[in-house]
Amino acid sequence: MCRPEVVLPVDGAVPFLELRGSRHPCITKTFFGDDFIPNDVFIGCSGEESESQASCVLVTGPNMGGKSTLMRQCGLMVILAQLGCYVPAESFRLTPVDRVFTRLGASDRIMAGESTFFVELSETASILHHGTSHSLVLLDELGRGTATYDGTAIASAVVKELAENIQCRTLFSTHYHSLVEDYSHCTAVRLGHMACMVENECEDPSQETITFLYKFITGACPKSYGFNAARLANIPEEVIQTGHKKAKEFERITVSLRVFKELCSYAEDLKADASTFTALVKTITEL
């Protein structure tokens, strides 16, 4: 346990949150005891692995890898700190937080005629209307209640608003990897993921062995490993195999579209280089 240090912001100072070796207070005492894996969270300040001082952190990682737990413990730590409590961490420094906004889990208000996705958007709207640069925002998988393209577009627009306009401290978890690609070079956004170890990675998902490390590190996770979660949930093997084949088909289509888009973007320049143009056309044909 440590005594949090609340740092009063001076003029022009960027709000920050520096959490080292933190553990979830409830889960530590209830389920795991001393086996809970501690994590560091840096928002608005540079950490040991990254010099980025971005206010928004995009969190990726495998299903069941600990993303939601990390976000919840971060919010709970802030509340405990500003209540004057000691917190389960090696050290905790932060500037004051005016409000903690959350959009976690999935639920509807069926008696009010509000769908799950509508409730998600209502909670998000509250964040965008009332959040300030001193707020803490925890957004967990925004956009999953609608079509992939709609969900990705809405999530991307919300990240842009939070990171570039409101500039509040944000943890935004997502499985939209195209969203991660879009913001991989944005200085206002930092990438982080819950680490895992994959053994026997191959075309057959039933042969993969995934070990969750529950460690939050820098960078993006390449996959969400949804078929591993399906196997753990006892989805029939033939259904998993069929789904995996369809996933590979979707992946090939996505790659083909990306290459075709690049080809169209540089068509004028490639006309002068016939060999490069021919090579790209051949690549598209093979895909």
Image (cartoon, grey):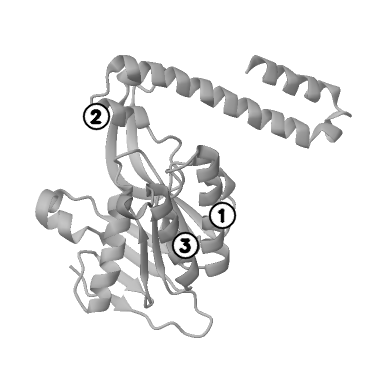
Taking the image as drawn, is residue 70 in sight? yes
Left/right placement of residue 13 relative to residue 67 reads right
Which numbered tag is attached to residue 125?
3
Left/right placement of residue 178 relative to residue 33 reads right
In percent of the image, x 42 and y 43: which residue is there?
145
Q: Position of residue 180 (x, y in %)?
A: 52, 45
Task: Answer few, some or many: residues within 10 Å of disc 2's Cα (few below 14, many 20 plus, some between 14 and 19).
Answer: few
Q: Counting residues from the N terminus, which is met first, the one under dot 2 or under dot 3?
A: 3
At mark 3, the secondary structure is helix
Q: For residue 164, which quarter of the picture? A: bottom right
In percent of the image, x 33 and y 18: which residue is there?
239
What amino acid type should be assigned to the residue bearing mark 1? Ala
Q: Position of residue 104 (x, y in %)?
A: 33, 54
What amino acid type should be assigned to the residue bearing mark 2? Ala
Which numbered tag is attached to residue 157?
1
At mark 2, the secondary structure is loop
